[in-house]
């Protein structure tokens, strides 16, 4: 593992790959690691080294076996088999489909065990004495069953296909890996809504019928496309596991774990543009300065997985560029988990070149999982101290190969016995094409009787069939299957019922053991993580209302016109908001009811009947302790074991009026009470009518007062405008009067000045005294 100190050279400078180094801001976890600060180049270096270790381990130890297993499942011989050579071009090349039949039989057994009854998964509180935890456990239990039963994008994952696919991965690759997260995706869209027209005073405008005038307004709304718990199955070649991790759970306990996600380039560009990819794939937000132009060609780190994909898809790799259009180039995203300095870090990579998100602790990226990585892995067989155990199909292949060889040799011998070798004397002029193409009513022209002779090969010996029977027995014993071939092989048991049960019990015990291993390693941890997602993220009021109706623990909102309906589940209830808050603090336990006998529905039914019979003997004692038998649950289990999904369509709730009649005295009192109730009801209806009439009258008065108020406001507005005009006229007249007065004053002053000047001139012109 690389170690970086704070004294290393500046790693934020551009490196040899041409990418700008972006130093990650130190987080609280980095400050605790002796002041270490890692740049993008450091994180990518750790990713590349660990990815190379994982891919090399796959190439050297797993790729050949996985390719062989997938080819066997597709009824094809191994690569470069002798049957593909020129020497075998005219010989039998049959592949006996024992491997595919055994895998499909195990898949059918898994489906019968997991989906034969309506409720296989049970969610119970850790502290059963806590009433709040018990209530939350019932709510989440019903929510989980509702979600897993839905296959649309809005409510739930495709649980059936995911479970069967995971079981198939364990059969073919030895280990299955899946991711559990809450998938959320929304899209902005324009909605047209009608709203009342509002005047300047803030009141709605009314028409001549005193009804609000409506107008169409465009509003930007949000449409939720996905809002569900998701379980995504990761192909085995896309799950890169630390080969030095704990063999019991290398995904959680390994030093690193990477998961590859092939994504179309157009989809990736859209997710980066809208910055909603983190919520769709889980985790936190991505960076905003992501430049896809840095990618040159295909960014898949290696081509080691091509052979596995081609073997699985019969020679085709659907992620090749030739299968994509202009916008459909496949780019590889990698979700990275790396334990460094005692902290489990999480970030996203685009190939080996671009970091899509900043490294943060896992508990911050997926808080609902409480520090665990949101991935689970399961195995088909237990092999201690081996990280990747051998797949069951891999252990069957030596016997499968011998069965193919023995069967093809038998067919070759049988064909040669039916159509013998022809001997033709050279130089006799025999038409060889007539000899080769002979058939019924055919003729061959010869010169001598011995020109053409036939050398018949001996037919296959009887020991060949015995050897084939022994191989069939060994294969069925190893695979843990019981079929018609097993019956044909074990004739010494005379096909008695007891003998067939002994064979079936022996094979079922192996199948049930493998099934229980898979349930313990993958099913229960996966369900546990889905429960964590529901407890942390569930906020859909519609689904919570359905769950509340089924459990009777959530107070449902009042529906107009149905306020008087009687509650089918009386008792204490909580609001939807309180239920959401309580779920986030829940401490729950998850259990999957798949035990011994789960693969045989008849055996399960017999065991259930025996259990109910024994329980009936102790039922009085149980009832004294305050417990009662749930008849509806018993009926659901019985009908599920015989092949029905549920028993709802076979039963109906018995109405209250069909119950046993009470004694006459009680009936008389009930009749009196009913009369009093009807009188009260009549009085109540009369009061309601009066109140309704009063409300309608008050509404009419309110509408009339609103009209009068509007008229008064209009009159006040008109009076204000009139007064405003009068004030303007008065101001204008006043200004004119002042202007005239000012003009008159100026004229008087001018006249006074003129008179003064005239008098002065006169005085000057008047002769002085004594002067002539």
Image: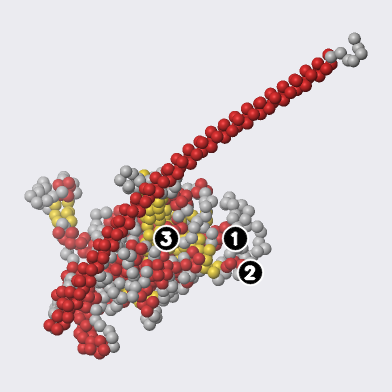
User: Does residue 262 appear left or right of residue 480 in this picture?
Assistant: right
Residue beneath disc 2: 34
The quadrant the N terminus occupies is bottom right
Front-most of residues 670 and 232: 670
Q: Is residue 192 visible?
A: no
Q: Which mark is residue 25?
A: 1
Q: Residue furthest front?
A: 770
Residue beneath disc 3: 238
Neighbours of disc 2 within 10 Å: few (<14), some (14-19), many (20+): few
Neighbours of disc 3 within 10 Å: few (<14), some (14-19), many (20+): some
Q: Quadrant of residue 626?
A: bottom left
Instruction: Tell me which numbered mark, 2 or 3, is placed earlier along the sequence.
Output: 2
Q: Quadrant of residue 123?
A: bottom left
Q: Residue furthest top?
A: 772
Q: Nearer the viewer, mark 1 or mark 2?
A: 1
User: Does residue 304 appear left or right of residue 727 in this picture?
Assistant: left
Do the numbered discs 3 and 1 sit on residues whose CB atoms are within 8 Å?
Answer: no
Q: Is residue 743 visible?
A: yes
Seen at 9% across and 51% down, the residue is 440
Q: Secondary structure at mark 1?
A: loop
Report the Cα–Cα distance between label 3 and label 1: 31 Å
Seen at 72% across and 22% down, the residue is 751
Report the Cα–Cα distance between label 2 and label 3: 35 Å
Q: Secondary structure at mark 2?
A: loop
Neighbours of disc 1 within 10 Å: few (<14), some (14-19), many (20+): few
Instruction: Tell me which numbered mark, 3 or 1, is placed earlier along the sequence.
Output: 1
Q: Quadrant of residue 765?
A: top right
Seen at 25% across and 62% down, the residue is 689
């Amino acid at each position: 593992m690389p170690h970086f100190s704070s004294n290393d050279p500046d790693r934020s400078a551009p490196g040899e790959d041409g990418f700008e180094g972006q130093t990650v801001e130190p987080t609280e976890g980095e400050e605790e690691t002796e002041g270490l600060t890692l740049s993008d180049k450091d994180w990518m270096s750790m990713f590349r080294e660990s990815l190379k270790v994982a891919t090399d381990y796959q190439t050297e130890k797993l790729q050949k076996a996985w390719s062989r297993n997938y080819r066997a499942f597709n009824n094809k011989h191994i690569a470069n088999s002798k049957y593909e050579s020129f020497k075998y071009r005219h010989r039998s090349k049959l592949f006996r489909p024992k491997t595919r039949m055994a895998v499909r039989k195990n898949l059918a057994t898994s489906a019968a065990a997991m989906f034969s009854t309506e409720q296989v998964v049970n969610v119970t509180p850790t502290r059963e004495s806590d009433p709040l935890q018990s209530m939350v456990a019932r709510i989440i239990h019903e929510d989980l069953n509702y979600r897993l039963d839905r296959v649309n994008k809005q409510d739930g994952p495709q649980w059936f296909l995911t479970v069967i696919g995971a079981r198939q991965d364990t059969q073919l690759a030895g280990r299955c890996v899946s991711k559990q997260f809450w998938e959320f995706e929304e899209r902005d869209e324009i909605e047209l809504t009608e709203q009342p027209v509002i005047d300047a005073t803030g009141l709605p405008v009314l028409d001549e019928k005193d009804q609000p005038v409506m107008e169409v307004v465009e509003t930007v709304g949000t449409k939720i496309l996905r809002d569900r718990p998701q379980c995504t199955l990761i192909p085995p070649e896309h799950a890169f596991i630390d080969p030095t991790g704990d063999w019991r759970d290398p995904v959680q306990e390994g030093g690193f774990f990477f998961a590859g996600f092939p994504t179309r380039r157009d989809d990736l560009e859209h997710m980066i543009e809208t910055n909603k990819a983190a919520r769709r794939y889980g985790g936190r937000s991505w960076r905003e300065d992501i430049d896809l132009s840095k990618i040159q060609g295909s960014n898949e780190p290696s081509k080691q997985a091509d052979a596995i994909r081609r073997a699985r898809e019969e020679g085709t790799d659907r992620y090749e560029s030739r299968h994509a259009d202009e916008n459909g180039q496949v780019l590889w995203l990698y979700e990275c988990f790396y334990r460094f300095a005692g902290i489990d870090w999480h970030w996203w990579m685009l190939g080996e070149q671009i970091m899509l998100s900043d490294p943060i602790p896992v508990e911050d990226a997926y808080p609902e999982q409480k520090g665990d990585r949101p991935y689970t892995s399961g195995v088909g067989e237990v092999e201690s101290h081996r990280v990747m155990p051998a797949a069951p199909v891999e252990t069957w292949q030596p016997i499968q190969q011998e069965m193919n060889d023995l069967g093809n040799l038998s067919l070759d011998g049988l064909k040669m016995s039916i159509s013998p070798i022809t001997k033709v004397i050279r130089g006799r002029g025999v038409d060889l094409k007539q000899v080769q193409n002979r058939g019924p009513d055919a003729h061959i022209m010869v010169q001598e009787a011995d020109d053409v002779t036939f050398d018949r090969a001996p037919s296959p010996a009887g020991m060949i069939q015995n050897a084939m029977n022994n191989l069939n027995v060994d294969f069925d014993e190893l695979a843990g299957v019981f079929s018609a071939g097993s019956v044909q092989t074990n004739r010494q048991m005379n096909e008695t019922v007891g003998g067939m049960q002994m064979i079936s019990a022996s094979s079922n015990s192996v199948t049930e053991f493998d099934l229980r291993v898979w349930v313990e390693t993958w099913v229960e941890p996966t369900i546990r993580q889905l429960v964590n997602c529901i407890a942390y993220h569930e906020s859909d009021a519609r689904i919570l209302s359905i769950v509340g109706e089924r459990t009777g623990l959530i107070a449902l909102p009042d529906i107009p016109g149905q306020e008087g309906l009687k509650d089918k589940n009386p008792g204490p209830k909580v609001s939807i908001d309180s239920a959401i808050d309580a779920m986030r603090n829940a401490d729950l336990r998850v259990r999957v009811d798949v035990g011994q006998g789960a693969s045989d529905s008849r055996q399960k039914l017999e065991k259930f009947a025996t259990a109910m019979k024994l329980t009936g003997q102790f039922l009085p004692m149980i009832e004294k302790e305050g417990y009662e038998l749930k008849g509806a649950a018993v009926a659901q289990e019985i009908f599920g074991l015989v092949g029905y999904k549920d028993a709802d369509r076979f039963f109906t709730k018995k109405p209250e009026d069909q119950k046993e009649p009470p004694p006459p005295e009680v009936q008389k009192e009930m009749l009196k009470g009913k009369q009093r109730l009807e009188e009260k009801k009549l009085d109540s209806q009369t009061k309601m009518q009066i109140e309704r009439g009063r409300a309608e009258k008050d509404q009419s008065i309110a509408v009339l007062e609103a009209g009068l108020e509007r008229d008064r406001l209009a009159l006040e507005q008109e009076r204000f405008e009139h007064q405003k005009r009068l004030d303007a006229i008065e101001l204008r007249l006043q200004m004119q009067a002042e202007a005239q007065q000012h003009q008159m004053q100026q004229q008087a002053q001018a006249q006074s000045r003129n008179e003064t000047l005239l008098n002065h001139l006169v005085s000057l012109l008047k002769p002085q005294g004594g002067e002539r």
